[in-house]
Image (tube, rainbow, N blue to C red):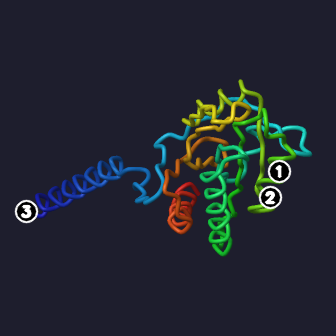
Amino acid sequence: MKKTMLIAVVAAGLISGIAAGIALRNKPEHQPLILSSATRFSQPRALPVFSLAVFNQSEFTGESLKGNWTLVFFGFTNCPDVCPTTLATLDRLIEIMKPVENIKTPSVLFISVDPMRDTPEKIRDYVQFFNPNFIGATADTLTLQTLTRAMSVAYMYRPTEDANNYTVDHTSAVLLVDPDARLHAIFSTPHKAADMATDLRKIIGAYN
């Protein structure tokens, strides 16, 4: 009788151990994040090799993005509404993020898709109006096309009533690049600094 009970106890222990092992094996590695303003890629996207022109710097490459979170926005300095509004929102976002302990403040990179009119110096002056720490850059047309395609950004030059002028239609999303220089998430419009900050903290916390 005692032998039978011992076998039953051992068998129960084995079954419990097997069940626990199966449960552990089937447990997802990361719990899904509940985000209100961002869409996070299940697999971050590697960026192509690129080189951007930044005022007073030799170049800005993928290596320049490594080691820190970066919010990237594509636009142009003659933009009448979306660009200044978005950059102002990003400035508020950075202010909100500053008090958070153990989370390094993300960088902000503005890339002009209008290299014909936007020189590195002009872009520098433009972004620093919103925040002195913002980085402004641009590149030749081929580099811009390669980079925007990889980051799911579209832009198009459109003539205006003034035959000597034009405007640029462009994607208004803010893109999040992780410390490994990969496209990690996208913040779609409308952009609200508080909501973006909440999602950023969740994304960064899950990454670490």
Q: Residues within 10 Å of mark 2 (few under 14, many from 20)?
A: few
- Please report contact status of discs 2 and 1: CB closer than 8 Å, yes or no: yes
Secondary element at tag 1: helix
Task: State how far apart marks 2 and 1 are (Cα).
Answer: 6 Å
Q: Residue 33's quadrant in the figure?
A: bottom left
Q: Where, quadrant-wise, is the C terminus in this rendering?
A: bottom right
Which residue is tagged 2? 128
Compared with residue 208, is residue 43 higher up or lower down, i.e. above or below?
Answer: above
Query: Residue 108, how many percent across, how many down?
Result: 70, 54
Mark 1–mark 3 Cα distance, whole angstroms, equals 86 Å
Name which of mark 1 and mark 3 comes first in the sequence: 3
The three-letter code of the residue at mark 2 reads Gln
Q: Residue furthest left?
A: 1
Secondary element at image label 3: loop
Quarter of the image that includes the N terminus? bottom left
Contact? badges 1 and 3 (CB < 8 Å): no
Q: Residue at x 59, y 30 (%)?
A: 149
Query: Mark 3 — residue?
Result: 1
User: Which residue is tagged 1?
Assistant: 124
Query: In terms of depth relative to the viewer, which is nearer, 137 or 183?
Result: 137
Give the x, y percent position of residue 162.
68, 35
Give above or below for 161 relative to 77.
above
Q: Callout 2: helix, strand or loop?
A: helix
Out of 62 and 157, give the one closest to the viewer: 157
Q: Residue at 53% of width from left, 58% of height from top?
A: 191
Q: Is 154 rendered above or below residue 97?
A: above
Q: 202 and 56: which one is in front?
A: 56
Q: Nearer the viewer, mark 3 or mark 2?
A: 2
**Contact (CB < 8 A) between labels 3 and 2?**
no
Question: For the residue marked with disc 1, what is the amino acid?
Answer: Arg
Residue drawn at 67 percent across, 51 percent down = 70
Of tags 1 and 3, the one toward the viewer is 1
